[in-house]
Amino acid sequence: MTDTVLIVDDEESVRRTFREWLVAAMPDAQVLAVADAESALKAANDTAVDLAVLDWNLGSGSDGLRLLEDLVEFRPDVVAVLVTGFAHQATPLDALRMGVRDYIDKNQNLTRETFVAAIRRQLDRTRPAKLQRELNRQLAAFRAAVEKVLPIVQTSAAFNDPVPLPAAV
């Protein structure tokens, strides 16, 4: 089962760097990188996103927390990691309340290792629920298929039941 990570940052160099780090560290993951909230919402509508890496300040008056509120509309199970260069403005407690599961300060502890570790940690936490959702989806599909076939099988069985012959006298 492939993990899908959506990176949203208005700085192209940051997006590219984060994407390169993740692709190198997790070659089986699908990594999407977009510049703004509108592109992020389109990507989340088109693809099942497991984890969103959100910049605090997305430019043009938008921020990662507002985007997260909107993303949850498309993907209620999405988990977010907030990355910011504005730690003095970001409110970690509000972020946690809204579904952010990790918080990385670009100016303090952001290295390839800390970034990849934070993403892996959150993906590891999401996998059991993701597997359960997939199992439930497959079970529902199986049930629907059985419900379609069952009347045919029952009808066929009724035609194939041998009619008891009268006993010879």
Image (cartoon, rainbow, N blue to C red):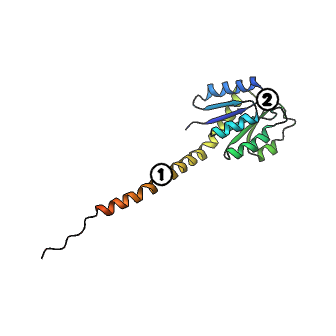
Task: Classify residue 23 by image quadrant.
Answer: top right
Q: What residue type is labelled 1?
A: Phe
Asked which secondary structure carries label 1, the reply is helix
- State the quadrant of the N terminus: top right
Q: In this view, does 37 lie to the left or right of 125?
A: right
Q: Do the residues labelled 1 and 2 touch (CB within 8 Å)?
A: no
As shown in the figure, which amino acid type bears the numbered disc 2?
Answer: Lys
Q: Which of marks 1 and 2 is in front?
A: 1
Query: In the image, residue 51 lies at what x, y percent?
Result: 67, 38
Say if residue 166 shows up in the picture: yes
Residue with the mark numbered 1: 142
Q: Which residue lies furthest to the right in this view?
A: 88
Task: Please state, as top left, top right, bottom left or bottom right, where the C terminus lies in the image.
Answer: bottom left
Whole-Å distance between the Cαs marked 1 and 2? 47 Å
**Left or right of 79 on screen, residue 160:** left
Q: Whole-percent x and y of residue 48?
A: 62, 40
**2 with respect to 108 (left or right):** left
Residue sitting at 41 percent across and 59 percent down? 151
Image coords of residue 120 (percent x, y): 64, 35
- Residue 70's disc is none
- Residue 49 seen: no
**Looking at the image, which residue is at 74% across and 45% down?**
99
Which element carries disc 2, helix, strand or loop? Answer: loop
Dividing the picture into quarters, in which one does residue 14 lie? top right
Identify which residue is drawn at 84% across, 41% down: 91
Q: Residues within 10 Å of mark 1 (few under 14, many from 20)?
A: few
Q: Is residue 7 above or below residue 69?
A: above
Residue at x-position 79% and y-position 41%: 66
Q: Residues within 10 Å of mark 2 (few under 14, many from 20)?
A: some
Residue at the spot of label 2? 106
